[in-house]
Amino acid sequence: MKTLIDVFTVALPLLYFSTVWAYAKAFFKDSAAAKRTKTPLLLATLAVHLSYLLLRSAFFNHPPITTIFEIMSIIAFSIGAAYAVIEFQTKVKNTGYFILILAFIFQTISSFFIENLSEVKPVLRSSLLGIHVSSALLGYAAIAISAVYGFLYLMLYHHIKSSRFGVIYTKLPNLETLEKMSILSIIFGFSFLTVAIAVGLIWLPRAFDHFSYFDPKLIGTVFIWAMYGAGLGAKKTIGWQGRKIMILSIIAFAVSFFSLTIINVYFSAFHKFY
Protein backbone atom coordinates (compact mmCIF):
# COMPACT_ATOMS: atom_id res chain seq x y z
CA MET A 1 0.00 0.00 0.00
CA LYS A 2 2.88 2.37 0.83
CA THR A 3 4.34 1.91 -2.67
CA LEU A 4 0.97 2.79 -4.23
CA ILE A 5 0.75 5.92 -2.06
CA ASP A 6 4.22 6.98 -3.26
CA VAL A 7 3.26 6.34 -6.89
CA PHE A 8 0.08 8.44 -6.53
CA THR A 9 2.07 11.21 -4.83
CA VAL A 10 4.19 11.55 -7.97
CA ALA A 11 1.38 10.86 -10.45
CA LEU A 12 -1.18 13.38 -9.17
CA PRO A 13 0.63 16.59 -10.26
CA LEU A 14 1.11 15.01 -13.69
CA LEU A 15 -2.56 14.07 -13.91
CA TYR A 16 -3.68 17.57 -12.88
CA PHE A 17 -1.24 19.10 -15.38
CA SER A 18 -2.68 16.89 -18.15
CA THR A 19 -6.22 17.90 -17.16
CA VAL A 20 -5.40 21.62 -17.09
CA TRP A 21 -3.58 21.27 -20.43
CA ALA A 22 -6.66 19.61 -21.99
CA TYR A 23 -8.98 22.37 -20.73
CA ALA A 24 -6.52 25.04 -21.96
CA LYS A 25 -6.27 23.42 -25.43
CA ALA A 26 -10.05 23.23 -25.65
CA PHE A 27 -10.48 26.88 -24.58
CA PHE A 28 -7.68 28.65 -26.47
CA LYS A 29 -7.16 26.33 -29.49
CA ASP A 30 -10.61 24.79 -29.99
CA SER A 31 -8.96 21.35 -30.08
CA ALA A 32 -11.61 18.70 -30.81
CA ALA A 33 -9.54 15.98 -29.10
CA ALA A 34 -9.14 18.12 -25.97
CA LYS A 35 -12.87 18.83 -25.88
CA ARG A 36 -13.60 15.10 -25.97
CA THR A 37 -11.04 14.05 -23.36
CA LYS A 38 -10.99 16.89 -20.81
CA THR A 39 -13.98 15.82 -18.67
CA PRO A 40 -13.08 12.07 -18.60
CA LEU A 41 -9.52 13.10 -17.72
CA LEU A 42 -10.80 15.25 -14.86
CA LEU A 43 -12.96 12.40 -13.51
CA ALA A 44 -10.04 9.95 -13.74
CA THR A 45 -7.78 12.41 -11.90
CA LEU A 46 -10.38 12.86 -9.14
CA ALA A 47 -10.82 9.07 -8.85
CA VAL A 48 -7.06 8.61 -8.38
CA HIS A 49 -6.95 11.52 -5.95
CA LEU A 50 -9.83 10.15 -3.83
CA SER A 51 -8.12 6.73 -3.76
CA TYR A 52 -4.89 8.44 -2.67
CA LEU A 53 -6.61 10.23 0.22
CA LEU A 54 -8.40 7.06 1.36
CA LEU A 55 -5.17 5.03 1.14
CA ARG A 56 -3.31 7.61 3.22
CA SER A 57 -6.10 7.60 5.83
CA ALA A 58 -6.08 3.79 6.05
CA PHE A 59 -2.31 3.27 6.01
CA PHE A 60 -1.38 6.03 8.47
CA ASN A 61 -4.55 5.56 10.57
CA HIS A 62 -5.61 9.21 10.60
CA PRO A 63 -7.39 11.65 8.24
CA PRO A 64 -4.90 13.41 5.93
CA ILE A 65 -5.07 16.71 7.82
CA THR A 66 -2.04 16.54 10.10
CA THR A 67 0.27 18.81 8.08
CA ILE A 68 -0.30 21.85 5.89
CA PHE A 69 0.79 19.80 2.86
CA GLU A 70 -1.80 17.07 3.52
CA ILE A 71 -4.40 19.84 3.80
CA MET A 72 -3.21 21.31 0.49
CA SER A 73 -3.92 17.96 -1.15
CA ILE A 74 -7.47 17.99 0.22
CA ILE A 75 -7.89 21.58 -1.01
CA ALA A 76 -6.76 20.49 -4.50
CA PHE A 77 -9.25 17.60 -4.47
CA SER A 78 -12.02 19.86 -3.13
CA ILE A 79 -11.49 22.41 -5.91
CA GLY A 80 -11.52 19.69 -8.58
CA ALA A 81 -14.57 17.94 -7.12
CA ALA A 82 -16.53 21.18 -6.63
CA TYR A 83 -15.77 22.23 -10.22
CA ALA A 84 -16.83 18.80 -11.56
CA VAL A 85 -20.19 19.09 -9.78
CA ILE A 86 -20.72 22.63 -11.12
CA GLU A 87 -19.78 21.53 -14.66
CA PHE A 88 -22.24 18.62 -14.38
CA GLN A 89 -25.01 20.85 -13.01
CA THR A 90 -24.63 23.69 -15.54
CA LYS A 91 -23.35 21.71 -18.57
CA VAL A 92 -20.88 24.59 -19.13
CA LYS A 93 -17.42 23.12 -19.79
CA ASN A 94 -15.26 26.00 -20.99
CA THR A 95 -14.20 27.56 -17.69
CA GLY A 96 -12.27 24.62 -16.27
CA TYR A 97 -8.84 25.99 -17.12
CA PHE A 98 -9.34 29.01 -14.83
CA ILE A 99 -10.42 26.81 -11.90
CA LEU A 100 -8.37 23.64 -12.20
CA ILE A 101 -5.04 25.43 -12.46
CA LEU A 102 -5.53 26.20 -8.73
CA ALA A 103 -5.92 22.48 -7.99
CA PHE A 104 -2.76 21.75 -9.98
CA ILE A 105 -0.76 24.34 -8.00
CA PHE A 106 -1.97 23.09 -4.59
CA GLN A 107 -1.35 19.41 -5.43
CA THR A 108 2.09 20.09 -6.89
CA ILE A 109 3.23 21.90 -3.73
CA SER A 110 1.70 19.12 -1.60
CA SER A 111 3.43 16.32 -3.53
CA PHE A 112 6.80 18.03 -3.30
CA PHE A 113 6.76 18.58 0.47
CA ILE A 114 4.29 16.10 1.98
CA GLU A 115 5.49 13.98 4.92
CA ASN A 116 4.30 10.54 5.95
CA LEU A 117 3.44 10.74 9.65
CA SER A 118 2.37 7.63 11.54
CA GLU A 119 2.61 9.16 15.02
CA VAL A 120 0.19 12.05 15.55
CA LYS A 121 -1.79 13.51 18.45
CA PRO A 122 -4.77 11.29 19.45
CA VAL A 123 -7.20 14.13 18.69
CA LEU A 124 -6.14 14.00 15.02
CA ARG A 125 -7.44 10.44 14.64
CA SER A 126 -11.10 11.46 15.13
CA SER A 127 -13.48 10.73 12.24
CA LEU A 128 -15.60 13.73 13.29
CA LEU A 129 -12.51 15.90 12.86
CA GLY A 130 -12.16 14.45 9.35
CA ILE A 131 -15.78 15.43 8.54
CA HIS A 132 -15.34 18.87 10.13
CA VAL A 133 -12.15 19.73 8.21
CA SER A 134 -13.22 18.10 4.92
CA SER A 135 -16.54 20.00 4.94
CA ALA A 136 -14.76 23.26 5.73
CA LEU A 137 -12.24 22.76 2.92
CA LEU A 138 -14.97 21.79 0.43
CA GLY A 139 -16.80 24.97 1.48
CA TYR A 140 -13.73 27.15 1.04
CA ALA A 141 -12.97 25.50 -2.32
CA ALA A 142 -16.50 26.27 -3.53
CA ILE A 143 -16.32 29.92 -2.45
CA ALA A 144 -12.88 30.23 -4.10
CA ILE A 145 -14.53 29.01 -7.31
CA SER A 146 -17.36 31.52 -6.84
CA ALA A 147 -14.73 34.29 -6.59
CA VAL A 148 -13.05 33.11 -9.81
CA TYR A 149 -16.41 33.22 -11.60
CA GLY A 150 -17.03 36.63 -10.06
CA PHE A 151 -13.68 37.84 -11.41
CA LEU A 152 -14.44 36.37 -14.88
CA TYR A 153 -17.86 38.07 -14.77
CA LEU A 154 -16.35 41.48 -14.01
CA MET A 155 -13.62 40.99 -16.64
CA LEU A 156 -16.18 40.08 -19.32
CA TYR A 157 -18.44 42.94 -18.19
CA HIS A 158 -15.66 45.49 -18.71
CA HIS A 159 -14.68 43.92 -22.05
CA ILE A 160 -18.27 44.30 -23.26
CA LYS A 161 -18.55 47.83 -21.85
CA SER A 162 -15.36 48.89 -23.68
CA SER A 163 -16.37 47.01 -26.89
CA ARG A 164 -13.40 44.63 -26.75
CA PHE A 165 -14.59 41.42 -28.36
CA GLY A 166 -11.50 39.19 -28.19
CA VAL A 167 -10.98 35.62 -26.99
CA ILE A 168 -12.46 36.36 -23.56
CA TYR A 169 -15.72 37.57 -25.11
CA THR A 170 -15.98 34.76 -27.65
CA LYS A 171 -14.96 31.82 -25.43
CA LEU A 172 -16.38 32.59 -22.00
CA PRO A 173 -20.04 31.90 -21.18
CA ASN A 174 -22.30 34.98 -21.15
CA LEU A 175 -22.72 37.15 -18.06
CA GLU A 176 -25.94 35.46 -16.99
CA THR A 177 -24.30 32.01 -17.06
CA LEU A 178 -21.21 33.18 -15.17
CA GLU A 179 -23.46 34.69 -12.50
CA LYS A 180 -25.43 31.45 -12.28
CA MET A 181 -22.20 29.43 -11.84
CA SER A 182 -20.94 31.81 -9.17
CA ILE A 183 -24.24 31.65 -7.26
CA LEU A 184 -24.25 27.84 -7.48
CA SER A 185 -20.71 27.82 -6.06
CA ILE A 186 -21.80 30.11 -3.21
CA ILE A 187 -24.70 27.78 -2.38
CA PHE A 188 -22.31 24.80 -2.26
CA GLY A 189 -19.82 26.75 -0.16
CA PHE A 190 -22.48 27.99 2.25
CA SER A 191 -23.91 24.47 2.64
CA PHE A 192 -20.54 22.84 3.36
CA LEU A 193 -19.57 25.61 5.80
CA THR A 194 -22.88 25.04 7.59
CA VAL A 195 -21.98 21.34 8.03
CA ALA A 196 -18.43 22.23 9.15
CA ILE A 197 -19.68 24.72 11.76
CA ALA A 198 -22.38 22.34 13.05
CA VAL A 199 -19.98 19.37 13.39
CA GLY A 200 -17.36 21.65 14.93
CA LEU A 201 -19.75 22.94 17.57
CA ILE A 202 -20.60 19.34 18.52
CA TRP A 203 -17.08 17.91 18.44
CA LEU A 204 -14.70 20.73 19.46
CA PRO A 205 -15.99 21.18 23.08
CA ARG A 206 -15.56 17.42 23.64
CA ALA A 207 -12.07 17.28 22.12
CA PHE A 208 -10.44 20.32 23.76
CA ASP A 209 -10.52 21.22 27.45
CA HIS A 210 -9.66 24.84 26.65
CA PHE A 211 -12.33 25.22 23.94
CA SER A 212 -13.66 28.77 23.55
CA TYR A 213 -16.50 30.19 21.47
CA PHE A 214 -14.43 33.37 21.22
CA ASP A 215 -11.56 31.74 19.32
CA PRO A 216 -10.68 34.14 16.43
CA LYS A 217 -10.75 31.34 13.84
CA LEU A 218 -14.21 30.23 14.96
CA ILE A 219 -15.49 33.83 14.93
CA GLY A 220 -13.94 34.39 11.49
CA THR A 221 -15.58 31.26 10.05
CA VAL A 222 -19.00 32.23 11.41
CA PHE A 223 -18.55 35.77 10.06
CA ILE A 224 -17.72 34.41 6.57
CA TRP A 225 -20.69 32.04 6.74
CA ALA A 226 -22.94 34.98 7.72
CA MET A 227 -21.62 37.12 4.83
CA TYR A 228 -22.53 34.48 2.27
CA GLY A 229 -25.85 33.83 3.99
CA ALA A 230 -26.65 37.56 3.88
CA GLY A 231 -25.72 37.69 0.18
CA LEU A 232 -27.98 34.76 -0.68
CA GLY A 233 -30.74 36.30 1.45
CA ALA A 234 -30.37 39.67 -0.31
CA LYS A 235 -30.59 37.97 -3.70
CA LYS A 236 -33.76 36.17 -2.65
CA THR A 237 -35.53 39.03 -0.86
CA ILE A 238 -34.43 42.33 -2.43
CA GLY A 239 -33.27 41.08 -5.81
CA TRP A 240 -29.52 41.56 -5.58
CA GLN A 241 -27.92 40.30 -8.79
CA GLY A 242 -25.18 40.94 -11.34
CA ARG A 243 -22.18 43.03 -10.31
CA LYS A 244 -23.30 43.45 -6.67
CA ILE A 245 -23.32 39.70 -6.04
CA MET A 246 -20.08 39.19 -7.98
CA ILE A 247 -18.28 41.92 -6.02
CA LEU A 248 -19.62 40.42 -2.77
CA SER A 249 -18.25 37.00 -3.76
CA ILE A 250 -14.77 38.47 -4.32
CA ILE A 251 -14.80 40.51 -1.09
CA ALA A 252 -16.04 37.52 0.93
CA PHE A 253 -13.32 35.34 -0.57
CA ALA A 254 -10.68 37.94 0.40
CA VAL A 255 -12.01 37.79 3.99
CA SER A 256 -11.90 33.97 3.83
CA PHE A 257 -8.29 34.05 2.63
CA PHE A 258 -7.38 36.41 5.49
CA SER A 259 -9.07 34.06 7.96
CA LEU A 260 -7.34 30.96 6.56
CA THR A 261 -3.90 32.53 6.58
CA ILE A 262 -3.31 35.40 9.02
CA ILE A 263 -5.92 34.49 11.65
CA ASN A 264 -5.24 30.76 11.44
CA VAL A 265 -1.47 31.14 11.74
CA TYR A 266 -1.13 34.03 14.20
CA PHE A 267 -4.33 34.36 16.25
CA SER A 268 -6.04 30.98 16.65
CA ALA A 269 -5.47 29.31 20.01
CA PHE A 270 -6.79 25.75 20.39
CA HIS A 271 -8.25 25.60 16.86
CA LYS A 272 -5.13 24.37 15.03
CA PHE A 273 -4.69 20.78 13.97
CA TYR A 274 -1.09 20.68 12.74
Image (tube, rainbow, N blue to C red):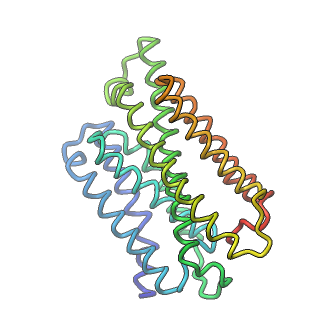
Q: Is residue 128 left or right of residue 174?
A: right
Give percent across and percent down for residue 170: 31, 25
Q: Nearer the viewer, residue 240 or 148?
A: 240
Quadrant of the rendered image containing residue 187: top left
Q: Residue at x 62, y 35 (%)?
A: 251
Give percent across and percent down for residue 253: 59, 42
Image position of 125 with respect to 22: above or below: below
Give percent across and percent down for residue 161: 45, 12
Quick one: quadrant of the C terminus? bottom right
Quadrant of the rendered image containing residue 41: bottom left
Quick one: quadrant of the N terminus? bottom left
Q: Residue at x 39, y 25 (%)?
A: 175
Image position of 44 with respect to 63: above or below: above
Q: Residue at x 63, y 78 (%)?
A: 124
Q: Nearer the viewer, residue 148 or 193?
A: 193
Q: Residue at x 51, y 64 (%)?
A: 74
Give percent across and percent down for residue 78: 46, 58
